[in-house]
Image (cartoon, rainbow, N blue to C red):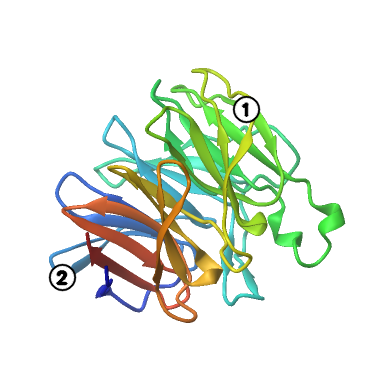
Amino acid sequence: MRWKAEIHVTGLGFPEGPVALPDGSIAFVDLLDAKIRAWRDGELRELAIVSGAPNGMRLGPDGMLYIANNGGIAPLTLEQLNFCDPQITGRIQRLGPNGVLADFATDLPGAKPSRPNDLIFSPQGELVFTDPQNWDVLGIDAAVYHGGQLLVAAVDGTVRHLAALTGLPNGLVFHPDGSLLVGITMEHRVLRLPWLGDRVGPMEEWCRLDDRFNPDGMVFHEDRLYLTGSDGDRIAILDAAGGLVQMIDTGLGSDPTNCCVHAGRLWVTLGFPGQLISYLL
């Protein structure tokens, strides 16, 4: 199958975390511009301005948008990061349909800084999220990296630790078999953790990609996993067993960061070009 991208929005800072809203809009975060925006039928609107840097987003069962805020880091280039001023502590925030933004979970366990990256709701309605902590030291002095962690926030916002993770834990999704998949960006692989309701079982490698593919955001649709490869400028399509079905080449320097499926299309945010695009499925 040949994939042809349709470009819907350009001129963004560094978009991530596309989410289909009930009204048909595609909402997404923008790390560099520190905003949450939504697009529908050619119209781009601003939903909120956010302190720090909104890194990932999901629509909750309560109709609110839940945002993983990393505290204020946004990529400028592959080698350069922007640190907003002032920085805030990493946290989970919640945006209501009325446009009111509020903190949901701020007391996060583990070493500091906490830098929540991406999130997913569990079958029990709790919010599972990745925290790669001080990942900004990777490539500079990996010896001082604290490592990543997998956390879960209960419905009252209290957070507990689920697992320690190596590398840079990033996107995550529940597999149709009920297990949890987590992408480890710098290790070019996806881990599988059995989901036991209130905890996870022993992790194992579910799939490994080539050394140019850095797993980022992901979504399951029917029996396929669509996995963005950020720095590798590709989207991997995997079957339910982790086998590679096809690669979508998104173009040099495109940096696909995350994706969602809505109305028969795969919606993708491209980081460095600052675009929202889609592919017909």
- Residue 219 lies left or right of residue 255; in this view the side is left
Near-viewer residue (145 or 32) = 145
Q: CA distance from mark 1 to mark 2?
A: 41 Å
Q: Return the x and y of residue 20 as percentages of the image width and height.
A: 25, 50
**Residue type beneath disc 1:** Leu
Q: Return the x and y of residue 196 as percentages of the image width and height.
A: 52, 18
Q: How many marks?
A: 2
The vertical placement of 37 against 131, above or below, is: below
The residue under the point 49% across, 18% down is 197
Near-viewer residue (278 or 118) = 278
- Residue 57 lies left or right of residue 264; in this view the side is right
Res. 42 mark: 2
The kind of secondary structure element at disc 2 is loop
Near-viewer residue (33 or 174) = 174
The residue under the point 44% across, 45% down is 67
The residue under the point 54% across, 29% down is 152
Q: Is residue 48 visible?
A: no
Q: Quadrant of the C terminus?
A: bottom left
The vertical placement of 271 against 90, above or below, is: below
Extreme residue toward the right, this view: 143
Extreme residue toward the bottom, this view: 252
- Residue 39 lies left or right of residue 268; in this view the side is left
Res. 70 mark: none
- Residue 16 lies left or right of residue 69; in this view the side is left
Q: Quadrant of the N terminus?
A: bottom left
The kind of secondary structure element at disc 1 is strand
Q: Is residue 67 visible?
A: yes
Q: Return the x and y of residue 84 as percentages of the image width and height.
A: 60, 65
Residue with the mark numbered 1: 162
N-term mark: 1 or 2: 2
The residue under the point 31% across, 38% down is 64
